Amino acid sequence: MSRKQQLLKRHRRNKRVALVVGLLVLMTAGVLVAWWLPLILAVLLWAAHEAWFADHLFYSPSDDYQYAFPADSAQPGVRLEAGRVLLDAPLTLAGDETLILGIELKSSWLGRLLDPAVEMLGLDAPDQQVFERGVAGRRYLNLTGAAHVLGAGELRLRGRFCRVKGQPRLWLFRQPDYRQQRVMVIAPHADDAELAAFSLYSQAVESWVVTLTAGEIEAEHYQRMGLPKADAARLKGRLRSWDSVVVPRWAGVPEAQCVQLGYFCMQLPAMQSAPQQPQASREAQLDDTRLFRQFNALVLPGDADGAPTWSNLIADLRVLLLKARPQVVVLPTPLLDPHPDHICAHAAILEALQGLEWQPDTLLGYANHLHDNDRWPMGDSGNGVALPPRFDATLELVPCSLQLSLSQQQDKAMALGMMHDLQPRAPFKRRMRRLLQQWLAGRGPSPYGENEFFRKSVRRHELLWVLKQD
């Protein structure tokens, strides 16, 4: 069982205990006060739960985030005076550096009901980065894009439902302009590339988008059309396969450089554990990947027999790496992302690169899912992306943040809107929860779409992690 599954199991157990206690309280109120009181209290408690306690947050908001950055990372001296972030000494900044500011936050009492945020003023367009309700500890702001304002001493911080305590600490990371290099994005599922790195691959001098699985499972939306389970899964897989090779065209990626490998969703771990053994789809009654490869412009080793094996996957990736010769490979990082297919996608690329005559200069990692917080990045569409929760400082991490203009955010939103998997309406319970959170907790909807990924991913920043740099 993965760490995230363990945390979710504990979270559900605690909620069941709380439910039993709540029922006992309601029954007592009905006996001692009035029969109708439990009904009113039950509705109020349910609304309060949905508005304020429904987030999957598997740590205390008072826990300090723990990051270790390389010892040789630049750390310009800064101080906070009357809300203004001031450099201790003049600093030459080009404007595209990744800037991370460590701060101490303390929530106000209102910040236990409404999302606390740190507003950054003095920018061309003000930014705010949002944190957990009740936050009380060390957090990391992303100042990427604020270099010139910082250098001029015009950057101001203002807490919203929280206050900034003590003195901040600044880290500066200078990286090559990856947009000037050949880039290959590895996506375990259709939409992972767009969620994590649309801005990068849409601006790179040459881009490839390689999607490993068809994402055919959990096709209930298509079953409601009257399709049997297997047929619904096949339809969903075909649609997502189409999306994976067509949507990158919106960003200018040539058709021949958009590749769908057609392996089956959530079967990569089983494939990895038995590399020569085919692993059929869980729901589509398929053991041949070629149905989902029909839109590819390239012929790959796995096309010979269509067998869904780890060996075929590695052979496909080796051919693509040699053909594309990417200088930068963007892939999920298991240091932050717990999704089983994402962990296996990372492992597959490392295995495919072993002994290969072409090696990329840079590996950039991304996390579209987290162990500890299903809402991260917190806040609304268009906000900046602060560093995610992390509580293990044994491994050094190097952030790489790219800034998106409003027009780039809008293009990214349109790309996500073309993805069929993000189009169906949310379940009624989730829609009710969002309405209550809007009314009671002050959370706004995304202007781009109902799916949660529009809020999470259409942001001022795309946050990647340098896993290897030559």
Image (cartoon, helix red, strand yellow):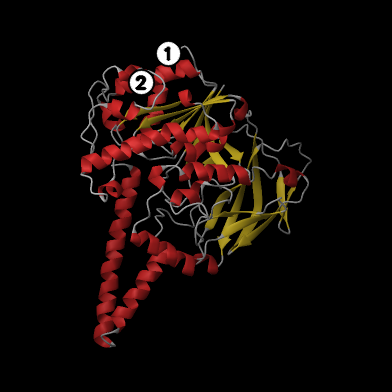
The residue drawn where x is 29% and y is 72% is: 22
* Amino acid identity at mark 1: Gly
In this view, 323 is above or below 336: above
- What residue sits right under mark 1 in the picture? 355
The residue drawn where x is 48% and y is 57% is: 61
Left or right side of 443 for 294: left
* Amino acid identity at mark 2: Ile
Q: What is the CA distance from the residue labelled 1 to the residue labelled 2?
A: 12 Å
Frontmost of labels 1 and 2 is 2
Q: Quadrant of the C terminus?
A: top right
The residue drawn where x is 60% and y is 25% is: 205
State the residue lying farthest toward the front: 226
Disc number for residue 467: none
Q: Quadrant of the N terminus?
A: top left
Residue 256 percent coordinates (x, y): 46, 23
Residue 49 appears in the rendering: yes
State the residue lying farthest toward the bottom: 33
Please, what secondary structure does the residue beneath circle 2 have? helix
- What residue sits right under mark 2 in the picture? 314
Left or right side of 182 for 257: left
Q: Name which quarter of the figure residue 171 lies in.
A: top right
Residue 322 percent coordinates (x, y): 46, 15
Q: Answer few, some or many: residues within 10 Å of disc 1's Cα (few below 14, many 20 plus, some between 14 and 19).
A: few
- Sequence-wise first label, 1 or 2: 2
Nearest the eye: 105 or 279: 279
Residue 379 percent coordinates (x, y): 53, 55
